[in-house]
Amino acid sequence: MAPRSSLSRRRAALEDAWARWVPGRVIERAGADSPAPATGSVTEESPAPPDEELTRSWLRSLRTVDPTQDSAPTSADAGARWADSPLRAPVEALDDELRSIAEDADFVAAVTDETGTILWSHGGRVMRRRAERVNFAPGGRWDEAHMGTNALSLALRTDRAHTVFSAEHLVAALHGWVCYGAPIRAADGRALGVLDLSTTWDRAHPLALATVRTLAASVETALRQRAPAVPGVRLTCLGAGRLVRDGRPIRLRPRHLEILTLLALEPDGFTHERLRCAVYGERAVGSSTLKSEMSYLRRATGGEITSRVYQLVSPLSCDAVDLAAALAAGDTATAVALYRGPLLPGSDTPGIVEWRDFLEVGVRTAVLSATDPEFALRYGEYAPEDLAVHEHALRLLPAHDARRAVATARLHHAARG
């Protein structure tokens, strides 16, 4: 635990920044009903919070949250949500450990769903009473739109673990708290909720964030172990090619993966001649060659391809199809999460090359148009030579953000290349 004197000084500095910054923004909002000012518009008399991510979160939160509210609003159906939640079984398996941490260290532990609604909680003697006063309990809405900046809302929004200390919380009723939250993800990467540990500000401890990360990872491991084999066919073709049928891998030659990918991406199907051009280009091949490939592919997929027009009988679950849909919907967060590299990177098949370029340009354009540095950092992992993406990440990252080291190293590597 950090010395109380240093925690007290930090809390006092944060309270001062909050008192000189937040009320003025509330007055601005109530006065002219004008949009919240940009981060860079804060003045010396009205200093911004010490962290740029907090500044952005406070500005977003102030659109819907009164910083003087005394508790979180309630969702009436939390009991039904918990009964149906995929998190229920793995969290209940950790019940003894979570209760022990809460009672022995006087924390309150909580688990939310993907909307930020608390589904389960347990607190120590002191924190239980504090939690009840602010509705940090099943049914409480703790997403950014309902309870402002806190560890749960930041973990949900950024898909990363966060600590929020004292007056870093937007809502003044939480200035006596320190909260540690880590996201919980399904096996396919979807956000399912957040696991949070909270206590009083004077009990802040550097190991608490590591603890909450470990507990969230335990829940994720249990989720993977409980997940049944996925029925049907799943095609993975971003970064690598793989076909899984009823949970079991199917061995396919590269040519068959290419054809299946094209059929998945173009559900209206291909005439024989158009598919031949998409697969072989200008190469001289007989019509029997493609027919033979299609016969083999039908056996591998269970006969799910029509013959007069080459077309999938039913839509195929495919990461590239999901990516194309995310781009069409303008959903950059989902697109970046799905992208794991170029479409079938070893292929020079004309149709695949065309789709590869389309998807790469789409994701890259969305990343360079976004203001969230996390998108550029994630995409940059799969685009090591892209100077513009790494430069974009550095422009967006605050000066003190530790992730700048990663972006700088990538930029240096790309520049040398």
Image (spheres, rainbow, N blue to C red):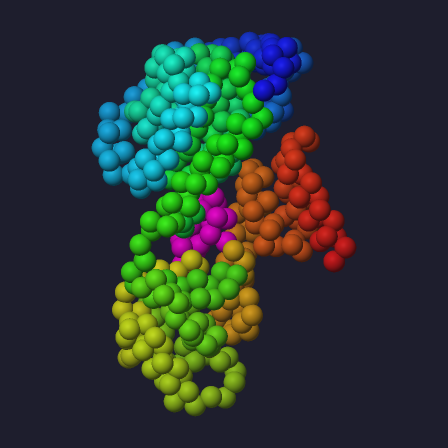
Residue at (55% x, 43% y) in the render: 375
**Nearest the eye: 102 or 363:** 102
Please, what is the dominant secondary structure of the magenta stretch?
helix
* Residue 242 in view of the camera: yes
191 vs 370, left or right, is left
Quarter occupied by residue 252: bottom left
Q: Is residue 96 left or right of residue 160?
A: left
Q: Position of residue 204 (x, y in %)?
A: 55, 19
Query: Where residue 269 sits: x, y (%)?
Result: 34, 70
Residues 280 and 13: in front is 13
- Where's residue 386, x and y in %? 65, 53
Q: Nearer the viewer, residue 387 or 90?
A: 90
At 43% across and 90% down in the image, what residue appears? 286
The image quarter in which residue 102 lies = top left
What segment carries the magenta color? 321-339
At a point 60% along the width and 51% down the height, the residue shown is 381
In the depicted structure, whether residue 165 falls above or below residue 271: above
Q: Is residue 326 magenta?
A: yes
